[in-house]
Image (cartoon, rainbow, N blue to C red):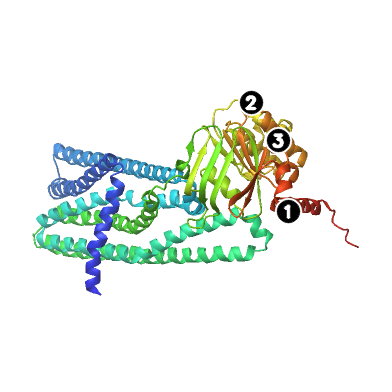
Amino acid sequence: MAAVQTAQAPSRLRQAVTLIGTLVRLHPRLFAVAVAGSAVYALCTVASAIALQWVIDHVILPRFEEGTVATSTVVAGLGAIMLIGVVRAAGVVTRRSFAVMTQYRVAQTLSDRVVDKIVGQPAPWHRRQTAGDLVARVGVDVDASIAVLAPTPFATGVALMVVVSSVWLIMTDPLLGAAATLMFPVLIAMNVMYQRRVDRFFRAAQDELGSLSEAVHESFDGVSVVTAFGAEERETERLAVIASRLREARVGAVRLRATFESLLDGVPNVVNIGLLLAGAYRVRAGAMTVGEMTSFVYLFTLLVFPLRLIGFALSELPHSQAGLDRVQEVIDEAWEVDPAAALTHTGSGVHVRGLVAGHLPGFGVLRDLDLDVPGGSTVAVVGATGSGKTTLLHVLAGLVPVEQGSISLPSGATTLVFQEPFLLAGSIRHNITLGAAFSDDEVLDALAIAEGRFVADLPGGLDAMLGERGTGLSGGQRQRVALARALVRRPAVLLLDDTTSALDPSTEARVLANLRRSPGASTVIAIASRPSTIALADEVVYLRDGIVAAQGPHDQLMAEVDGYRALMAAFEDDRGADAVAAPEVPT
């Protein structure tokens, strides 16, 4: 067991050096200034003990023994103490200021790198992540990773102080100096033992904090589902279990720290008493002066608190290492190929050849699909559940990778509007422009095409404020705002994933007519399930089992394709069933 611990010590030392080096390399100049300030503080601390010895031996004792002291001697002693104090204070201010600057500049750099990596990854990568975990990596994990930077400059100054103090103590009195100096390795060993034992608690706590953040985000995000299925108690229990594990890890770390703090308070005080008694005997024997003994004890006392800072720095190492590991996992993750890069932009229409694709690699929903959509036309995509309608639109939008085949799109933007529109908490204007420089006329024109004139009747108009996820608007109104958000960008291809499902048939028909009449009309590919809407399209693409089973005008498909005719009949039956009023419940 001892051999294992001995082998682990260098490894832990290397980990500490690697961790601090990794962080410091981000802003080395700021850190160097902080270390320089700490070195000034350390040297001035030792100098203050030497000045104290000189004042006692040359000012205070002569005044008691001889009754008088030269004014110049008093001025020199006071001047030395004041000068050392001012320089020492300047060192403290420099160390603290630049240590904080280093800490937060490093945090900014790490956050920027994580955010850049998250933002730069394509949609398939994001589908494998959870929002709560990514938020934790940018927030609490970055904060944890920089925690070690605040005490590190002070710890370097303390190390210098220990070396210089040890030399001075031994030179002052070899016997007492050796005894005092031997305590420094003991105190450092206590710190190392503490750090080694608390390591696993900090790692566990950091992991559980990420899990808790992820679970809480999921719970709030799906609060309607949790409530609808009466799962509040189960969800609360799930969060409570994670919180309990986090509490146990944190409590374990606090218990160890309390023991460590007690030992670090008690051991130096006991040693100080021993030095005071031994020093008195040394003074009585004439081996040292009163000033030397006083400065000796004074300096050792001054070192006790800084040595605690070494322990604090060491205690932050596992915490910071755990945070940096989680941050680095995101930063070091390989860039994934954006599915949109496989799409070519030539010609005026949409052309798909031999397409094989699916949301999961190797499980293609679309199988050898061929499709041609003329530029400027409106096409309805129809098919049974699982036929690949949404997958097709996601592939065309560059959200799902192409496994085989090729896709050619018109030059310009391709915009997808989802069935479930996501609106942000904020104004309607911001939800449409998303910060881009669109004029009010452009926004209003887009709303007019999307039949969103209701916005003018809202308090504030375009500046009307919405709650989270568009609270305050109906489902149909949210769909129209989301459609306007796509239209204001004048896309070459507009993909509608059952986007108008919450609209009544007449409003939906007006939206489609507006899309046709709008200047520079886009090529529209829309998933539809209303026979009345499907009949308004220029062409219908009938998907079955991941391929285009038929394509042509609605009337032609109704006359020639049995499967399509059966599907339309099923759609009509569903619409009819929805229209039947519920029977009254007898009272």
**Residue drawn at the location 46% of the way across and 57% of the way down:** 210
Quadrant into which the C terminus falls: bottom right
Quarter-of-image position of residue 393: top right
Earlier residue among tags 3 and 1: 3
Label total for image: 3
Q: How many residues crowd mark 3 within 10 Å: few (<14), some (14–19), many (20+)?
A: many
The reply to whether dot 3 and dot 1 touch (C-beta < 8 Å) is: no
Which structural element holds mark 1? helix
**Residue drawn at the location 41% of the way across and 63% of the way down:** 204
- Residue 342 position within the rendered picture, expressed as x and y whole percent measured from the top left: 45, 43
The reply to whether dot 2 and dot 1 touch (C-beta < 8 Å) is: no
- Residue 179 position within the rendered picture, expressed as x and y whole percent measured from the top left: 16, 64
Q: How many residues crowd mark 1 within 10 Å: few (<14), some (14–19), many (20+)?
A: few
On the image, numbered disc 1 is attached to which residue? 566
Per the model, the C-alpha gap separating discs 2 and 1 is 37 Å
On the image, numbered disc 3 is attached to which residue? 511
Earlier residue among tags 2 and 1: 2
On the image, numbered disc 2 is attached to which residue? 519
Quarter-of-image position of residue 105: top left
- Could you say which disc has been placed on residue 395 in the image? none
